[in-house]
Amino acid sequence: MRVLLPVANGLTTDHPIPFLPFVDDAHIPTDDPAATEAIGRGAGEGRWGRWDDDEEQGTWWAFTTDPLRPELAWCLRHHPEHGRSVIVYRNKDASSWYDAWWRERPILERAGGYWWDGSLWYRPLQVWNPAAEAYERRPAPGAAAVSAAHVLAESGGDPERGRVLSIVDLDLDPDAERGRPWPDDLAAWAAAHTARPGSLPLTACVVRLSAPELAADQMIGVAEFAALGGIGSSTLRAYISRNENDVPQPQAVVGGRALWALPVARDWAEQRSRSPEEIAATVAADDGSLPTGTADVRDRFAARFRVLLGDNPDLRRLFALRHRAGGVERVADELGRAVALSVDDIVPLDALATTVRHALLDELATERGDTARKPRSSTLYHPTADVTRMLDWLVRHHPHHAMRVIAEIVGEAERRLGIPQKATARTLHRALAMDGRLDEDTLDDFMRRVLPSTR
């Protein structure tokens, strides 16, 4: 996921992003999405424009390549109650911003990905719920919007010393604005804003947010963040420099030091724990090289091969006398491993996964249909032992496939049968505990990683 960083505020924005310069947007029809789109659409190679709306909500969003500086683009969001955001991005990031905005359609984003829906502030979207096929929306407790009126009263900016740039003069060097008195620029924006007919009052213009978890003494640096993810500081820095592993943006940068809110770092570590590699590790055999089920197959066949090779005189003669016992052991172990790893050639894994999913959904539907009571989160269903054992086989042999199957069952049971996610997750967990072969701690760890906190 590429980090998308804005480079400037448009002068007609209702919600200035802190410490970004203000740019005159008179050449962009920021109140007309169709006209905005028309500037860039079909204007030549590397130029683009688009707009969409939600008639029910009364919102619209649009972007266009700037006609004077085609390496930049204007991105607009409009809400009938909360006004509009006018933001300049690099042109190469504009379509990605547009696509990302489709997910939750936030009204505002601040502090490295915290976002506002007009009512609540949420943490950056990081934890994927495969059952819901959506990111978990995790509110930030005690978060509140800080208005332009509040910031101006606090900072006392002077509009006469403020600056509004033309798009041609905008410097993209991130150090160019360092040391500038941004409150003066904000005051200049406020003067232009209040002079515009129909503009939002400054008390409704959001500049930033405050939240207990964003207090200075609650923030952590690279070392603490890396420790939460079980990696070294150098590894985390490499992820950040290469834009890998979806490391969230820092909530603040103080003296060149990136700082994150502790809950944001924990969410990243939680999502990281649900990677295919981490899921597989939860059900790995003691040596960590194979899932426990595959290791069982290897051991069973290795034992058979040892007997076959060691007890058959014709085969035993093939091994040198001095190393006969060790040679038999090594060959038997390698043959056993080869068989275990080739189970996929014998068992049609994708077909089996689909069959298990349909079988469990059918059993849930049958039991759901036997009662008129509406399912609750505490409701438990009772899959048959045979079907559960097949799911257990998937968990022990192919944990990543099992993760996908469980997520699909939980999600489809909610959508088709009206069974809350938590009820289905608890049902599968209990069934695997009763009829599966994993020990309690391993099963608990696996299920905790497979699904985030289900609804």
Image: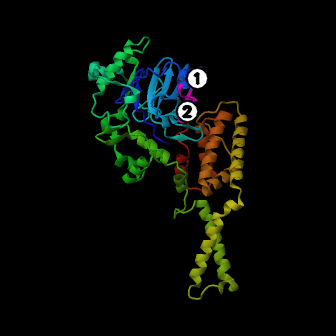
Residue 310: x and y in percent read 64, 81
Local packing at callout 2 (Cα closer than 10 Å; few below 14, some 14-19, many 20+) is few
**Amino acid carrying mark 1 in the image:** Asp
At 52% across and 56% down in the image, what residue appears?
281
Q: Nearer the viewer, mark 2 or mark 1?
A: 2
Task: Tell which of 349 and 110 is nearer to you.
Answer: 110
Q: How many marks?
A: 2
Question: On the rendered structure, is 113 left or right of 259?
Answer: right
Rendered image quadrant of residue 111: top left
CA–CA distance in space, label 2 to label 1: 28 Å
Residue 364: x and y in percent read 69, 40
Q: Which mark is residue 1?
A: none
The answer to whether 214 is drawn above or below residue 269 in the figure is above
Magenta stretch, main secondary structure, is loop
Rendered image quadrant of residue 149: top left
Task: Tell which of 328 and 393 is nearer to you.
Answer: 328
Residue 21: x and y in percent read 36, 28
**Amino acid carrying mark 2 in the image:** Gly
At 67% across and 50% down in the image, what residue appears?
388
At 44% across and 28% down in the image, what residue appears?
87
Q: Secondary structure at mark 1?
A: strand
Task: Tell which of 170 and 411 is nearer to you.
Answer: 170
N-term-proximal mark, 2 vs 1: 2
Q: Which residues are magenta?
A: 39-50
Local packing at callout 1 (Cα closer than 10 Å; few below 14, some 14-19, many 20+) is few
The residue labelled by disc 1 is 54
The residue labelled by disc 2 is 44
Q: Is residue 230 visible?
A: yes
